[in-house]
Image (spheres, rainbow, N blue to C red):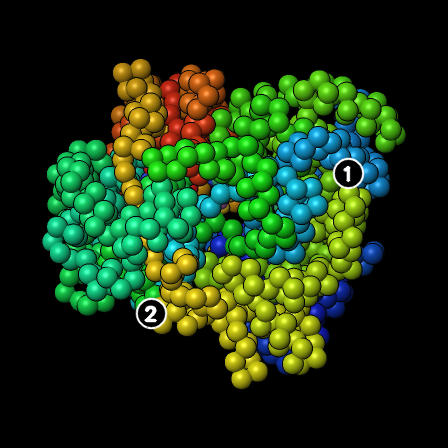
Amino acid sequence: MADNPNTNEVPIPPADAERSSRSCRYCIVGCSYEVFKWPVGEEGGPDAADNALDVDYPAGYGDWPSPNMHQIIEENGQEYHVIFRPNPDAEVNNGSHSVRGGTQAQSLYSKHNEDYDDRLKQPQIRIGGSLTPVDWDTALEVVARVTEYATRDEPNGYGMKMYAYQFVENTFAGSKLIFDVIGSPNFGFHNRPAYTPESPGVEHSGLYDWSTSYEDAAKAETMVIAGGDPYENQDVYFHEYVDAGSADIIQINPRRTFTANYAENNDGLFLQINEATDPVLLNAIARHIVDQGWHDQAFVDEWVMDDRDAIDEEGWYQEEFGMTPDEYIDLLQSDDRYAPENAAEITGIDATDIRDAAERIAQPDSDQTQTLFTYEKGLIWGWSHENTAAMANLALLTGSVGHEGTGITRLGGHQEGWWEGGPGGEVIAEHSTQSFTGEHVEDVPIPPNTIERVRNGEIDHWHVIGNDPLRHEHDTQSLRNRVRERTSGSQPQTADVGDIMAAFRERIDDGGMVVTHQEIYPNSTTEYADIVLPAKAVEAGEDSNHHRWNGERRFRHYASFMQGPPNARPDWEIFADIGRRLGANDMDWESSDDLFDHLAAEHGDSYPYHIEALDEKAQQDGTTPTEVMRDLDADGVRLPARLEDGEIEGTPRLHTPDGEEMPGDGRFFTDSGKAIFMRVDWDRVADVYEQLTPDCEAGELWVTNGRLNRLWQNMYTHQRLEYISKRYEQNVLQLHPNDAAERDIEAGDLVEVINDDVYNQYSENEQGSFTAVAYVVDDEDAVQGQTVPEGLAFTYWLYPGQVANDIVPGYLDPANPNPGYKYATGRVRRLGESDQKDRMSFHPENVAPE
Ligand SMILES: Nc1nc2c(c(=O)[nH]1)N[C@H]1C(S)=C(S)[C@@H](COP(=O)(O)OP(=O)(O)OC[C@H]3O[C@@H](n4cnc5c(=O)[nH]c(N)nc54)[C@H](O)[C@@H]3O)O[C@H]1N2
Ligand SMILES: Nc1nc2c(c(=O)[nH]1)N[C@H]1C(S)=C(S)[C@@H](COP(=O)(O)OP(=O)(O)OC[C@H]3O[C@@H](n4cnc5c(=O)[nH]c(N)nc54)[C@H](O)[C@@H]3O)O[C@H]1N2
Ligand code: SF4
Ligand SMILES: [Mo]
């Protein structure tokens, strides 16, 4: 590691410093940033006229970039200063940032950075057991020939696991490779094993899971936040919109987080739900609404489908789960488990609070509610159908869609950037060998669970791009064991393509598998890779221009401003090269701009986004879609985009009453333009719930998992950035003091979490375990309550080397194979003291302003 030249001083960019616009490399909010770059040795002056920031110095807080927003990079022997600061004039963030975004200058590729030596810089192939540098031609020729061999009988021998979000140019090229060029159905997104919707209950009801605008949070009167924590995970949305508004928050979470206390301290409600019981709570709220007659009958009559045949014709999912309003209300009222008193028993929430929540949601005194429904992974990574469908039902029942201050939306993870480049649905219908049989449908083909196929031998070449499945998938300990077994056969001994292919063919013939990992840093999956392809970090400004959108569909241009490791290549270019080697003749884009222009002109009508207007505008003005986007700068355009009086206009929210903003047929995404209630039935999951529930007698706890504010994902940047990583030197296990005392555990002890019987749908249960540092807060210090209740622990899910997903159950919804990642259990035992025991304070982190 080289010395970091950063001090407490930051150079002022000269007036002619190169300026470009992009958004944060991290979360969904997509805060806008400005980048200034100029040669080392030059500097601007304190007068506004003499600097690129247009500020007269000295100036106050907010007008000067912090040392964390400065970096020195080197290109072709020349050093440059880079200032990377939140854009003070951008609509989304208005100059605001989080600790993650505000430190991203420190993650740029620079010899002054800790991670400089650690970036993947050269293609590698495991030869004689070690990853060995090779040239691009050797590496990509092997990738193409292994793919050919793996798919020699049928296309299912190839499996791809790729991000959905890392810019439209990359996802377009990657999904074209698998669906169009190779024709395999074995696709898994970066966070789940299959090509499934993340919010099936919302999408199949005809709602879009990104239909609101950020202003709606500021204008709502009631805001439901279920299984999500925007203070921790979507910071600037919380600060600039939620906190700036005056909605009563209803936070639904098993943990009393900051957001829970914030809700209570500001006239809202905290519903501290028992783990995994949300469908019962949400149905009980809906039941109380209909029992009281508080639902929006006029909306339901006009906008919710009541014709059974028409529902069935929408597709098998609607046939299986869709309900007419009468059927839905009958389900709520005929099942006594949903009566608030009975629901209280399962969910742990008082009937009075359930009724209170129902009233705040339905707002019986107004004709039009101002209720906004938001949710994220606490619902999605559980009973993903029931949890998301129950939220959609509540929004429809109360007519809370399409008006200011209402709606239903995910809070979100990454910014979004999925643009399908091949016929995914058709390939799955033709080649998937996985099917679903339910109450109303039989043997319908569904997207394959690719993780199962890696385990059972169907996938012979596994191509993993920009994600770390051996850390983030379910049941990772046994998955790693299986992948180790399947990659341990015959090994290449020289860098000759013929020798390498002979070894790989032999391995595949023996039931083994070849793993290709396309990445920017080594991680858990790289340890098992045979072929490593180094990518440019385009999210950090390297190499090429790109586009994606945030949680209100705000589509923006990310201008490249630096090269990155010279011999790495952007993902779209790697996909195109592999595609051409496999015979594609339409993957010869000259640049990412060329690819984007093609996409806007030829594929601009991707559901439900529509960017054709960019191409129309470009033709009108004699320019290109890329240039149109560049001119839209920090504020971009909220999709769908349209051309009005020669200018690009956006769409603040979807599902408005006239539906005019939609280029399609109607207000909702169904053939009739009407929405559909979805069956949410606790019986569908009750058996699995029983099996997953921890055995308290045997000392088991729920061990749920999720995010911490300062850490981003598998910590690919943060494990290499001391400023952040020293705050969490090991994984964390939040424990209730009574659970800790029973096990002789104190704050700062090193503990082990063991699951002796990690649930597996195929009854091949195995053991899993990980270690962490116990975070225990004494009752007298817990001034606003304990974060975790008795019987439940919480851990960070992607900590390097202390992998929480080693105990995560292999439950996937049979209709829509999404994992129940949140529903893990385990025994906790003390190993000894951690080295942090005497150095850290372990004070509560959930204290919100009164
Ligand atoms: N700081 C930070 N922010 C991030 C990320 C990050 O790595 N770090 N990652 C981004 C990504 S990719 C994503 S997907 C989002 C995720 O954003 P969130 O979904 O908000 O994050 P999580 O912490 O995974 O889960 C949210 C909450 O679900 C709760 N939960 C657990 N089990 C249940 C349950 O049974 N019912 C209910 N109602 N709640 C439950 C947990 O206690 C937790 O507080 O965050 C994004 N933002
Ligand atoms: N128990 C449990 N499990 C979960 C979840 C949970 O809440 N609980 N959440 C799920 C969710 S929502 C998520 S998002 C996943 C996250 O799981 P992963 O997707 O595996 O985690 P990330 O750290 O986001 O992985 C991104 C990787 O991409 C690399 N990278 C960055 N930029 C580029 C690029 O331009 N090209 C390439 N090729 N690589 C790049 C980074 O180095 C990093 O290793 O975990 C899922 N698993
Ligand atoms: S809130 Fe999200 S997008 Fe904004 S600066 Fe933080 S990590 Fe980046
Ligand atoms: Mo995510």
Q: Is residue 411 visible?
A: no
Position of 576 relative to 559 (above/below):
above
Which x, y percent locates residue 288? 15, 49
User: Tag 1: Cα neighbours inside 10 Å, few (<14), some, or many (≥20)?
Assistant: some
Q: Quadrant of the N terminus?
A: top right
Position of the C terminus, as image quadrant, is bottom left
Q: In front: 38, or 48?
A: 38
- Left or right: where 335 falls relative to 693: left
Q: Amino acid at mark 2?
A: Pro
Q: Which residue is mark 2?
A: 657
Q: How dense is the environment of label 2, judged by Cα within 10 Å: few (below 14), some, or many (20 and up)?
A: some
Residue carrying label 1: 144
Q: Position of residue 487 (x, y in %)?
A: 68, 23
Residue drawn at (36%, 45%), measured in percent from left and top?
319
Q: With 695 as the anchor, is 415 left or right in this view?
A: right
Does residue 727 sit above or below 513 in this rendering?
below
Q: Residue at x 53, y 84 (%)?
A: 645
What element does badge 2 sit on?
Answer: loop
Q: Residue at x 30, y 43 (%)?
A: 679
User: CA–CA distance between discs 2 and 1?
Assistant: 50 Å
Q: Position of residue 176 (x, y in %)?
A: 66, 49
**Residue 807 visible to the viewer:** yes
Judging from the image, what secondary structure is the residue with disc 1 in? Answer: helix
Quadrant hosting residue 591? bottom right
If the picture is divided into quarters, which one holds ligand 2? top right
